Image: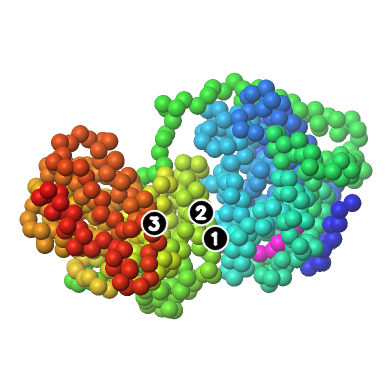
Amino acid sequence: MDPVGGPPTVQAAPHAPSECDAQPTRLGVVAHEPLDVPRRPHVLSPEAFYPLAYPAMFLSRQLEARLLELFRKGYVKGTVTSSAGNEATAVGAAMPLRPGEDVAALLHRDFVAHLLLGATPYQLVCQYLANAESPTHGREGNVHHGDAAQRRLPMMSHLGRMLSVAVGTTWAARRQGEDVFGLAVIGDGGSSTGEFHEAINLAAVRRVPVLFLVQNNNYSFSTPTELQYRCANLSDRAAGYGIAGKTIDGTDAWEVYTTVQQALALMQPDPEPMILECRALRLQGHAAYDKGDYVPREKLEAWRRRDPLPATRQRLLDIAGYSEGEAAELEAEVEAAIEEAVHDALRVGRPEPKRHAWVSYCSRARSRVAPFAAPRAKNGDAVRLALNYLLEHNGRAFLAGQDVGTYGSAFKTCKGLIERFGAERVMDLPICESATVGFALGASQVGAEPILEFQFADFATEATTQIGLNAGTWFFRAGRPAPLLMRLPCGGGLTLGAFHSGEFEGLWSCFPGLKLLYPATPQETFEALLAGFYDRTPCLVLEHKLMYWSRSGPIEFDGNLADVWRPRRYTEGDRLTLVAFGAMVHDALAAAAEVGGGIEVWNPFVLRPLNLDPIRQSVAKTGRLLLVQECAAAAGIGYPLIGELFCQGAFSLQCPPELVAATDTPVPFAPELESYYRPNPGKIAAAIRRMVHP
């Protein structure tokens, strides 16, 4: 038998009778309703617990078996992962939680937890069939579902990344006065990921009461646990975060249930996270395509003897006093509900692509806000003024990042904000870029309005999965807005070298569902931050560091947010259309002035989604197109922008379009090398002359 002991950091509390114990409840299982059980703060007696827990576990095992059968017949899409051996852990952990109030981030072996937290058997069958009534409208894989509106967060395969989202959701709900807790589930393999550490450390520092439940079923796909970690128990890691940890038998539903109830009770007066490792089992392969033949036969046989389903059934008889006939009657009701759910789901039609909502961006919440004016400001001032405006006008807004508090951020764009708005709204966080984005994404789901600053745009690559694959896809997958403003100080010219000088607009433009703005003036910077904040889609604003304190101008914002989302024209002409963004706008203007009149200079401003109609009209007028970007040709959006312009319109060009870009290397450090690397007015002017006077 595998060891299940651990440091007795959390002692099980003696059972305290509650009003729910008066009449033990028999679980009603129907096809079109979620499972209904008493929730915390009520604590069930063993006699009341097993008539609820066993049918839920039996439902999970039998319904998954039916889905596997449908998979083999070609009805279920993707694959089927089995919860067999994990049902006791999932039932015990989910039963205390209040659907729609407490936060849950579940995994693919938490089938029954979904049923206990709001999903119906019918909905789950539809999800696996990917039919027209699936909860995700056929957009997501069979285990990648949830209900973000009810705080059952949709799963993604990058498992560690789900934990910080649960932390942020729980933190934000408690920030607005709600007495809620979070459950964040991870596997033994997922506990090896970097964001496992980031999320728990962040929760510990911020004292967020999230129960991090580790399902240790001995294998991560085919990799045994001895190749995953060296500590005796995964809960031992809790000491490193200064929090409690405990390892228990995850095949004992009652032990899981009472331990979770006790953990939540301890978190009530002293909110802080906890690690609970549940030693569970995986009685089948990783998924339908996996025979699991890497598990030694004798070990598998030993596991089968510990199968939690028959063990729980026996306790239903011994402790709850059910007879064999009553247990069989209960099982027959479950089987009938499964048949009804499958029958009804198989009658549903397939999704119709032409009627599907192929939309990655949600609509904007506001079109107008209070106006603002400043007679003269530099770009760095514009950032600070915009942040002050947003925090002042929006009580649920908060600013987070590294050194944004007392220090005022690396480039002093946040100076003075913590003194005015306090440390709960201007938050210095640990160095955990990925978890910070997940935290903010979760917070956005319960009404908080996050503003994140990365010290350098280069560091945002640490959060590529969270930004591009989680936040960017959230609206399409979950049907919920994800208002999240991210600030990226970017660009070269300050001799900071390769790891502090990137822009990466080419990277972020590749992810559907993200909006990307790149201002060049104080006016544009102020407008970009306000427009990005009030948009309900994740927005990245690129702020070129070279322009923070080098250029100034007035800010005259009339409050019209809708008018912000447009390209900007700086000069008019009929000889050549010159497109640039960021610091290259000013170099382009200098080059155009050097060459002489007739050069029309544009900044797309919104790099994703592009609105190229005004620029297309300019190219049709001038017959020449020159595009300038600071980064290397393959790294930016220059060539894609040229391609999109010409794919969507026919032009009679005087000469082929050109792109002026950096050399195809990382940004060098020495001033002489960086100056040569970056485009400059001289290089741009030379390109103009080649095109205008060949």
Q: Secondary structure at mark 3?
A: loop
Reading the chain from its start, which is encountered first: label 1 or label 3? 1
The crowd level at tag 1 (other Cα within 10 Å; few <14, some 14-19, many 20+) is many
Q: Which residues are magenta?
A: 273-278
**Residue 321 disc label:** none
Q: Is residue 364 visible?
A: yes
The crowd level at tag 2 (other Cα within 10 Å; few <14, some 14-19, many 20+) is many
Left or right: 86 with respect to 152?
Answer: right
Left or right: 142 with respect to 275?
Answer: left
Q: Secondary structure at mark 1?
A: helix
Using the image as rendered, state which of residue 140 and residue 39 is in the foreground: 140
Contact flag, marks 2 and 1 (Cβ < 8 Å): yes
Indicate the amino acid at tag 2.
Gln
Q: Is residue 57 visible?
A: no
74 relative to 553, above or below: above
Using the image as rendered, state which of residue 293 and residue 547 is in the foreground: 293
Q: What residue is pinned by disc 3?
A: 504
Using the image as rendered, state which of residue 456 and residue 33 is in the foreground: 456
Q: Residue at x 61, y 30 (%)?
A: 77
Residue 274 within the segment the image draws in magenta? yes
Q: What residue is pinned by disc 2?
A: 466
Q: Residue at x 59, y 63 (%)?
A: 198
